[in-house]
């Protein structure tokens, strides 16, 4: 049992007695012992080394045992302390506990009492360590469960996340839209020592250029029209936590210069004042662009790029890690059915093969949307190949009919890799009609929602419904 132990007492006999106790017990032979002759000496040692257990005499020259206890409580609260005193009684006990001591021992020291106290302290520390490991395992499992896949590239990414999370390093996450950059950023924050602080997200592409500076840095009352009170910005809100600058490549050059100063000085200045405010905020940035190319084009500051690119994490597109698709499909089907109140569904191997073969230009986000759409528009319990007819359209294989309307089905070319010309002896037009009418029914006859789900315009939908009305004599 290797523990770091400090014995602080101005009496050498006491120091030697406690040291001999640890030497005499085999389980404690590996403990590393340091000695301090007074309180000042003890505090100096504590500043330079982390101890598991500290014994300190109450009355010592220069600084007392209470000074030692107070310093430990403020600077190393996880360290257990035992106060040694020649004056026992309730007052000594209360004084020791008030300063954070785990226990106190009255001189002359009893070997049996010393052994009992040390045993209890080490057992308690072992339980705390085991609990911390368990909590860490649970926390990792919770956040890793959101990041689904079995590919080696994803496994390598998660190994890097484990390594970088405990640090304060700036992280730059790159990858195409929909690859899961935000989930990786969330995992980094959640697995860091900052997890109790705020995780603030700001989408640099979604906020107007005129507002993003005030969003990031805050503003003082009266600094501009509408500034009716002092307002903290995202960086202040993320103090002691982390801030996610999503799609940072969309930030203009002037704001990039101000962000560079924030990273260098660790301080921000609200709009309307010149007073800097110190912050302790970890920065995680994402981009769906190649920032090296953006630097070459003059769209992104080179000095800011190097400041952000301390730990780069690149997430490959889904088409390059297709072994992750089956796990994602299974997870999304369960999620969609639960959230939308749909009866449990499964997917056929034929349909799964189709999804694995598809290139997913929209990555994981497109896959999730495709699963949701298929679950909504498929009344059967099993999703089949025809449940995903719309994928050809999303891949850009749009066809136009004689009236220049959009089609929600695949190309009729025999060379089309989806090969949906005839399924179960039903024509493409018949399948298309079934999908439209079933979707219309599920949306409560909302043409707007039906068109949105199917990815067509409301005008196209109305035209098709007019045809069906003529065919069936109905009023869709």
Image: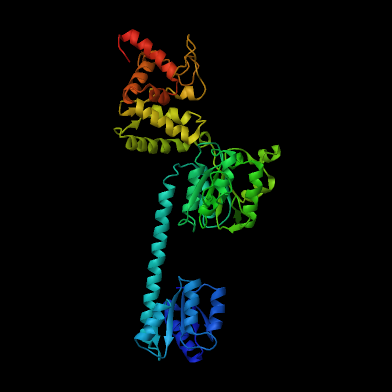
Residue 467 place in picture, x, y as percent: 38, 10
Whether 110 is drawn above or below 345: the answer is below
Residue 370 place in picture, x, y as percent: 42, 30
For the point 50% across and 31% down, the residue is 360
**Dividing the image into 4 quarters, which one contains the N terminus?**
bottom left
Whether 372 is drawn above or below 399: the answer is below
Whether 77 is drawn above or below 439: the answer is below
Of residues 156 and 6, the one nearer the viewer is 6
Whether 426 is drawn above or below 444: the answer is above
Asked whether the viewer can see residue 3, the reply is no
Residue 276 place in picture, x, y as percent: 61, 57
For the point 51% across and 89% down, the residue is 10
Residue 344 place in picture, x, y as percent: 30, 34
For the point 31% across and 9% down, the residue is 472
Instruction: Answer left or right for 38 relative to 448.
Output: right
Q: Quadrant of residue 278?
A: bottom right
**Dividing the image into 4 quarters, which one contains the C terminus?**
top left
- Chosen colour scheme: rainbow
Of residues 324 and 309, the one nearer the viewer is 309
Number of marks in picture: 0
For the point 35% across and 88% down, the residue is 89
């Amino acid at each position: 049992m290797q523990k770091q132990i400090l014995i602080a007492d101005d009496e050498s006999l006491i120091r030697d007695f406690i040291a001999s106790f640890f030497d005499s017990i085999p389980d404690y032979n590996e403990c590393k012992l340091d000695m301090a002759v007074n309180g000042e000496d003890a505090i100096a040692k504590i500043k330079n080394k982390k101890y598991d257990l500290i014994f300190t005499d109450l009355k010592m020259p220069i600084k007392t045992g209470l000074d030692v206890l107070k310093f430990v409580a403020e600077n190393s609260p996880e360290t257990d302390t035992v106060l040694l005193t020649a004056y026992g009684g309730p007052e000594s006990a209360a004084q020791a506990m008030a300063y954070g001591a785990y226990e106190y021992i009255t001189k002359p020291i009893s070997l049996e009492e010393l052994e009992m106290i040390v045993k209890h302290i080490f057992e308690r520390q072992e339980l705390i360590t085991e609990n911390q490991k368990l909590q860490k395992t649970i926390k990792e499992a919770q956040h890793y469960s959101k990041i689904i896949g079995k590919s080696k590239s994803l496994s390598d990414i998660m190994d890097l996340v484990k390594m970088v999370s405990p640090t304060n390093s700036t992280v730059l996450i790159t990858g195409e839209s929909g690859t899961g950059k935000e989930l990786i950023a969330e995992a980094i924050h959640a697995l860091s020592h900052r997890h109790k602080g705020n995780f603030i997200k700001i989408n640099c592409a979604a906020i107007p250029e005129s507002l993003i500076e005030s969003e990031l840095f805050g503003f003082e009352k009266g600094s501009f029209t509408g500034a009716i009170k002092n307002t903290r910005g995202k960086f202040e809100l993320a103090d002691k936590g982390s801030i996610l600058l999503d799609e940072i490549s969309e930030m203009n050059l002037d704001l990039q210069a101000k962000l560079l100063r924030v990273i260098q000085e660790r301080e921000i200045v609200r709009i309307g004042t010149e007073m800097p405010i110190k912050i302790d905020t970890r920065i995680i940035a994402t981009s769906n662009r190649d920032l090296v190319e953006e630097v070459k084009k003059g769209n992104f500051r080179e000095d800011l790029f190097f400041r952000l690119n301390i730990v780069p994490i690149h997430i490959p597109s889904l088409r390059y890690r297709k072994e992750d698709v089956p796990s994602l499909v299974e997870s999304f089907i369960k999620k969609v059915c639960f959230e939308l109140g749909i009866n449990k569904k499964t997917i056929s191997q034929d349909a799964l093969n189709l999804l694995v073969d598809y290139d997913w230009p929209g990555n994981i986000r497109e896959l999730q949307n495709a699963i949701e759409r298929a679950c909504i528009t498929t009344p059967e319990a099993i999703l089949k190949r025809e449940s995903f007819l719309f994928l050809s359209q999303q891949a850009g294989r749009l066809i136009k009919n004689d009236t220049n309307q959009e089609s929600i089905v695949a190309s009729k070319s025999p060379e089309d890799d989806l090969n949906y010309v005839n399924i179960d002896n039903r024509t493409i037009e018949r399948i298309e009609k079934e999908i439209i009418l079933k979707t219309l029914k599920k949306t409560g006859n909302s043409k707007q929602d039906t068109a949105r789900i199917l990815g067509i315009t409301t005008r196209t939908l109305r035209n098709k419904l007019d045809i069906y009305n003529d065919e069936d004599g109905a009023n869709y």
